[in-house]
């Protein structure tokens, strides 16, 4: 049984300090004290880098790694390499962690559990929720299942909001060390270690996963975040490759539920990127190259998509895309995306 193992909490930071101190305070105020906090400064401006150092000077459990900017995935990997804890946890620099989260995630784990995960809540007013629930000491319900079973929960976990993100969990470091976390860096240099690609793979590779049915992680919804902003860039372009990788993985590992779910999600990504690529700050030549790749991927997975999708409207839309991608892209962009601003 796990007693007092150290938990290393990794927080990548890049030129954002609005909520950083609140995030760090919510971690340092954990009821579980055997933690280290690793702030990975991913090439931030001088004032943000200095703020990271100031935070570290106030508590000897905080360490700072200053590095050149390589993106969130590389920052997380750097944090793992620096960590000295038996368990690894990730947090975003604008989020909050309920004060007994780590204690609840660590308490009573058996030796075969390699990931322990709790529930999250996504809010614009994250501070209000945190203040109201910080003293909630109710006893949660636990469930321990196989990693494959946890992965197959993702398609039906929209309301529970437990599984999908890399954060809100603790990972046994020994387990992570057995997996090539940089395997897909060449195809996806920016997002090779982010949620959509790696969470299903990590879950499926784990022997056992314990699920804590209690909100422990307060995710702050920020309109300017990469995943919420409509600005085209590597985060979206690389999903063309990462989605293809994940589908091949699910197929080869017989993850049927997640395979079907990923197919539907993948076609949403392909069609969205095809429509919005005109807003990307890249050359026309590169835009055409990406559009050709999208069409190629559409053809590769087309048969399987039409098999698993039960949305008639989306199927019809994809038929239209297949007939004339450019006309379809213009029509959808100007009647849907452009209209919504």
Image: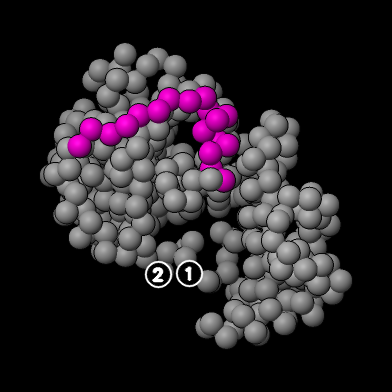
Q: Is residue 302 magenta?
A: no
Query: Where does residue 60 sit, x and y in percent of width and height?
Result: 16, 36
For mark 1, does the 10 Å Cα neighbourhood hold few (<14), some (14 to 19), or many (20 or more) residues? few
Q: Are marks 2 and 1 in contact (CB under 8 Å)?
A: yes
**146 drawn magenta:** yes
The residue stretch that appears in magenta = 138-155
* Helix, strand or loop at mark 1: loop
Q: Nearer the viewer, residue 294 or 253?
A: 253
Helix, strand or loop under label 2: loop
Q: On screen, 320 above or below 13?
A: below
> In the figure, is residue 129 to the left or right of 233?
left
Residue at left offset 16%, top offset 54%:
131
333 and 234: which one is in front? 333
Q: Which mark is residue 173?
A: none
Vertical position of residue 247 compared to residue 322: above or below: above
Q: Quadrant of the N terminus?
A: top left
Identify the residue at image location x=57%, y=29%: 148
Where is residue 302 drawn, in percent x and y?
81, 55
Q: Give the residue pinned by disc 1.
A: 229
Rendering coords of residue 42 (x, y %): 40, 52
Q: Residue at label 2? A: 223
Q: Residue at x 71, y 56 (%)?
A: 310
Q: Is residue 193 visible?
A: no
- The spot of residue 52 in percent (x, y) is 25, 51
Cα separation between marks 2 and 1? 6 Å
């Amino acid at each position: 049984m796990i007693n007092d193992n150290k938990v290393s909490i990794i927080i990548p930071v890049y030129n954002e300090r609005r909520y950083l101190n609140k995030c760090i305070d919510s971690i340092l105020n954990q009821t579980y004290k055997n933690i280290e906090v690793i702030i990975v400064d991913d090439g931030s401006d001088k004032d943000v880098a200095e703020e990271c150092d100031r935070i570290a000077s106030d508590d000897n459990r905080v360490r700072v790694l200053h590095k050149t900017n390589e993106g969130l995935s590389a920052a997380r990997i750097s944090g793992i390499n620096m960590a000295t804890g038996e368990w690894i946890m990730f947090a975003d620099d604008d989020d909050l962690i309920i004060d007994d989260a780590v204690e609840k995630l660590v308490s009573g784990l058996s030796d075969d559990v390699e990931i322990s995960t709790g529930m999250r809540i996504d809010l614009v007013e994250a501070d209000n929720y945190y203040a109201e629930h910080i003293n909630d000491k109710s006893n949660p319900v636990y469930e321990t299942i196989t990693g494959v079973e946890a992965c197959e929960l993702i398609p039906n976990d929209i309301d529970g909001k437990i599984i999908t993100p890399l954060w809100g969990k603790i990972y046994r470091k020994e387990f992570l060390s057995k997996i090539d976390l940089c395997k897909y860096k060449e195809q996806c240099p920016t997002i090779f270690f982010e949620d959509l690609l790696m969470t299903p793979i990590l879950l499926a590779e784990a022997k056992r996963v314990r699920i804590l049915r209690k909100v422990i992680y307060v995710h702050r919804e920020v309109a300017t975040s990469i995943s919420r902003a409509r600005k085209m860039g590597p985060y979206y372009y690389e999903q063309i490759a990462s989605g293809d990788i994940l589908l091949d993985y699910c197929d080869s590992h017989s993850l049927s539920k997640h395979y079907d779910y990923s197919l539907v999600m993948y076609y949403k990504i392909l069609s969205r990127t095809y429509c919005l690529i005109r807003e990307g700050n890249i050359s026309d030549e590169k835009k055409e190259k990406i559009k050709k790749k999208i069409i190629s991927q559409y053809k590769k997975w087309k048969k399987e998509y039409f098999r698993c999708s039960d949305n008639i409207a989306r199927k019809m839309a994809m038929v239209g895309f297949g007939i004339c991608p450019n006309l379809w892209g213009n029509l959808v962009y100007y009647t849907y995306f452009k209209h919504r601003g």
